[in-house]
Image (cartoon, grey):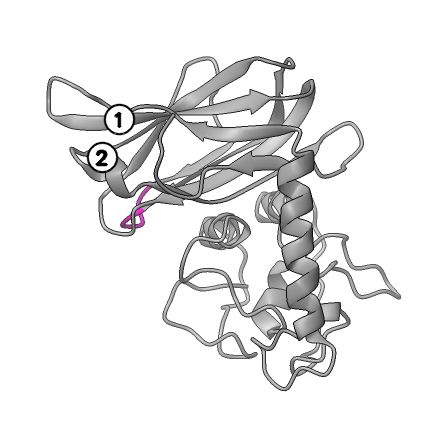
Amino acid sequence: MTLPPPFSDTSPAFGDGVLNILDLIQELFAVNNVPGFKPGTCSDRFDAMDLFPADTATTRGGDGMLDIRDLILELFRVNNLDPARPIRASMGGALPWAACAGASSGNSISPTEVNRRSAAAARLQAEAQGALLLGGPGVSSDAVERVPVYLEARQDLVRVAVTFGLGDQQSQLRFVPTAETPPSLAQGGQLGVAAAAWLEGVTVRAGERLLLGYVTGPVGMSANLRVYGVSAIGLGDNREVRLDAQTGGGLR
């Protein structure tokens, strides 16, 4: 389906007709807004990555958003747990989402949609059920800096699937999980980026923090470390779990 940069977001200039781990990593990065990996909102490649809800025999799938539900469906397909391989015809940027109404190009967003997203972002911060937090950095004996990554619960988070992407866009980073919280998927090979996902869910009680692991890199990398994106759902009802996140500086 997808290929690493450079590519075009317009069909058929991406993809190779085969689903494998590379597609899953591209989905992981796109869902978490990693710079350079999220396709234009109204583009063919966005449509190809917007898997949830799944296509049916009579209905085109997708909901106009990339989140952890798309990543879970991609995992199922890459591992052949879901044999579906739907083919969507190009709609030339005229996808059925508010952001694409009347769009003349794959990256066009209407003023109404800009206002809607601003209001949604403010509501998200006000109503967040938890937060992804970066702790203060420490330096190991081999001069490697590490920054703890916590999931904090403001309400009970029960069997919540969660994914995040973070980085500094310049250092070789790696995510090191704790023995108690092994992720379903982790990727740190891309320069300046580390991302991970817990697709089988974690549980954190209200007022508590769960240490997910550490981001490691060269000394000084924490000064520019920021969270690119975070997405979560409750596995019991498949509903979005709203999480706040640090977007730059101010490690806690």
Q: Amino acid at mark 1?
A: Arg
- Is 128 in front, or is 63? 128
Measured as percent of width and height from the top left, residue 148 is found at 36, 23
Farthest left residue in view: 142
Question: Which residues make up the magenta segment?
Answer: 188-192
Percent of width and height locating residue 141:
11, 17
| Quadrant of the image containing the C terminus | top left
Mark 2, residue position: 217
Q: Is residue 61 left or right of residue 38?
A: right
Q: Is residue 171 magenta?
A: no
Secondary structure at badge 1 equals: strand
**Label 1 crowd (10 A; few <14 / some 14-19 / many >=20):** many
On screen, residue 230 above or below 132? below
Determine the image quadrant of residue 149. Answer: top left
Q: Mark on residue 13?
A: none
Q: How many marks?
A: 2
Callout 2 touching callout 1 (CB < 8 Å)? yes
From this view, report whether residue 44 is shown above or below residue 196: below
